[in-house]
Image (cartoon, rainbow, N blue to C red):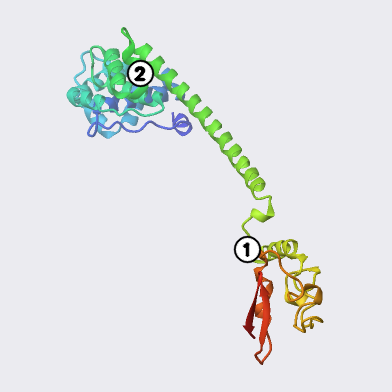
Amino acid sequence: MAEATNTFRLPPQLNVTEGNVSENFKKWKRQVEIYLVASGAVKKDGAVQVAIILNCAGPNIVDIFDQIQWTEGGDEKKPEIFFEKLEAYCNPRKNEVLESHRFWMVPYQEPFDNFLTELRTRANSCNFQEKDRMMRDKISFSVTGKLQELLLREDKINLDKAIKICRAYEQSYKHVKELRESTNSTHTVNKVTHHDKFKKKAYQPESKRPQTGYSQSQSKTSYNTQTNNKECNFCGYKHERKKEKCPAWGKTCDACKGRNHFKAKCKKIHSISTPQSDQEEDDCWLNAITGLTSENVIQAIGAESKTFQL
């Protein structure tokens, strides 16, 4: 027996002072029966088996064993009789009202089989006359939403059918959730890819792209080069619209002796038939005056001649 004890784990001692004593006994008895079979003790003499049971149960149960009134001589050596006596001792201490309350207060939890196992355990302690009906009703009251509608829709439903409906619903719900998550993930990837392509496409034209720093300056220079290279009103050539780039800048007109323009563009000898456009009004280059002395200069603006003090 020592070899068996070293090979297999002993069941815990039986607790007859705390909690649900009746339920404690049922669970403890099941573990002892497993131990007797696994260790081979079930093949031994009845007296040996009872001794093993008492050893597993603990000193409190040994005291109870000594107080039991045995009907016939030799019953104290029969393990099945001992189990019956011990169960009778534990059962009266069970409060059926309290156990019933605990049964109805079991909350629904997923997965469904965990809830079902807890419910069966509680129902076994309640001594229900119609245990299956009570469990069926408890399941119907505990579930919610679409699942509850499916259960209440059935006219004649027993416990087995209710269990099948709950398991099938739980499985289908998992499948739908998995499909939705997969679909949402695909849509998210497609949306990000499409958004990136759209951004690249939308910002392809350089002139419409918001720019800062060097890129903006470079774009502005390119734009000015394209738009400013037109015929100059002072020299007659095409060049960038800067006074330093004009060949007439600093030169004297042969016709009017004025500065900063050639004879070919002299306003005094060339009549102007139409007013200049708004885009050409800045060709006067007033900011180009660098002389220290003032003098009156006649400059044609539009169709009229105006006198300026420089």
Task: Identify the residue at horizontal 68%, vertical 86% (top origin).
Answer: 290
Residues at marks 1 and 2 touching, judged by CB atoms closer than 8 Å: no
Q: Which quadrant would the N terminus be assigned to in this image?
A: top left
Task: Identify the residue at horizontal 46%, vertical 34% (top origin).
Answer: 6
Q: Quadrant of residue 294?
A: bottom right
Which amino acid type corresponds to the residue marked 2 in the rendered image?
Answer: Gly
Q: Which residue is mark 1?
A: 212
Which amino acid type corresponds to the residue marked 1 in the rendered image?
Answer: Thr
Q: Is residue 40 above or below residue 296?
A: above
The residue lying furthest to the top in this view is 156
The residue lying furthest to the bottom in this view is 293
| Residue 267 in view | yes
Q: Which residue is mark 2?
A: 46
Q: Is residue 226 above or below residue 92?
A: below
Disc 2 secondary structure class: helix
Q: Quadrant of residue 83?
A: top left
Q: Position of residue 27 (x, y in %)?
A: 33, 26
Task: Identify the residue at horizontal 50%, vertical 24% (top origin).
Answer: 175
Q: Position of residue 170 (x, y in %)?
A: 43, 23
Left or right of residue 290, residue 229 in this image: right
Q: Is residue 239 above or below residue 122?
A: below
Q: Position of residue 66 (x, y in %)?
A: 22, 26
Left or right of residue 309, residue 167 in this image: left
Task: Identify the residue at horizontal 58%, vertical 34% (top origin).
Answer: 186
